[in-house]
Image (cartoon, rainbow, N blue to C red):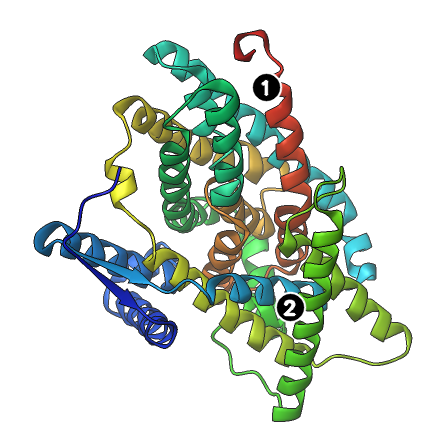
Amino acid sequence: MRLRSEVILNIGVYGTLVATSLVLLLGEKLIQWIAVLRTYSIPAPVAGGLIVAVSVLLIRLTTRIEVRFEPVLQVPLMLAFFSTIGLNAHISSLKAGGPVLIRFLALVAGLLILQNVAGVLLAFALGVDPLFGLLGGSITLSGGHGTGAAWSQVFAEHHGLNSATEIAIGCATFGLVIGGVLGGPIARLLIRRIGDDERRRISDRENETLVFEEPKAQQPTTPAAIITTLALISVCLTVGEMVAEWLAGTIFELPTFVCVLFVGVLLNNGLSLVRVQLDQHAVALVGNVSLALFLAMALMRLDLWELAALAVPVIVILAAQTLLMALYAVFLTFPVMGRNYDAVVLSAAHCGLGMGATPTAIANMQAITNRFGHSHIAFLIVPMTGAFFMDIVNAIVIKLFLALPFFR
């Protein structure tokens, strides 16, 4: 559902970039001014982006002016961020994180199944098509806007669900917002449950230099290192898009950002073999800037009107999914991952993955580690899980549910 506007105000690419930068600065100031945002570790892009999204909605409702920001930079910024994740990944480190990665992936898979079970059961209880339950489940919440758009088209064409696209967009928008808001409060709740010995270990980590965990720290780098990093990112984007095009339509088809990330992994480790070391501070600096700009741009471009257009049964399903995510993070993710500080950060990240997207999960982790201390293992396994494994498992889970008799 869309509100008919008399005037459409298009903000160009440069104006959008200016607005995005101001959103980030606004978010930082809001966190400084409002204690509750600091207390619950709300990421700056989420705080500032939501203020702008609400303001745009109010303008639309009161003046009949629809403000549209130019989205052309959003995808390149996202791809640039994922390329820096790849350029910061070392195969030896990934091997060391293997057991933890397997446990976390099992938790992610378990949530995907529970989201769909809960959605379908609630759909039956509310007397609506069970496909609404899937759309309000892992398709949009763990899958995001891209997965939601793809499956909504299938539901519309093959299952006759004419409102599938609008529902998918609304559910994914809801998830992106909640994913960025839920992580901080969950972390605050869980950090009280770790012991004194673990608190001392967190304090000992303060002297470590782990670049992605410190988005606000000054990074010692040079113009030449930044230029080299930008060149490598450009290679990742170019080759990654080519690989994605080659795989399109095959059983090995992958999202472009996954291809970009793995090109970065191969490039980084290939250079290491010939004893060429990247400036990780430069990589982290560009990656953190790209992530912040992407998230702020994505959130300020949210069409909150889509949320208002959701039917009551879908709203009930989404409210239940939010409760499920919180309970799952507290009573499953936290204990299974070890009941320590790393488990706290991973639980907050899982809220981002389970309700929003990988960048949201990273932003949640950065907000927490910037305040409480480093968690190297979380920054090692969450990007790989969210950018690659989760999409594959989610696709398998969705297809298995659609094979059930009442979906045929």
Q: Is residue 302 left or right of residue 111?
A: left
Kindly identify which residue carries mark 2.
84
x, y percent for residue 70:
37, 65
Q: Which residue is found at the position 47% from the left and 49% from the top?
A: 191
Amino acid type indicated by mark 1: Phe
Indicate whether 162 appears above or below 79.
Answer: above
x, y percent for residue 260:
68, 60
Q: Which residue is found at the position 47% from the left and 32% from the top?
A: 152
Q: Give the SS element for disc 2.
A: helix
x, y percent for residue 48:
30, 63
Quadrant in which the C terminus appears: top right
Quadrant in which the N terminus appears: top left
Q: Is residue 329 left or right of residue 171?
A: right
Amino acid type indicated by mark 2: Thr
Kindly identify which residue carries mark 1.
401
Disc on the earlier residue, 2 or 1 = 2
Q: Give the SS element for disc 1.
A: helix
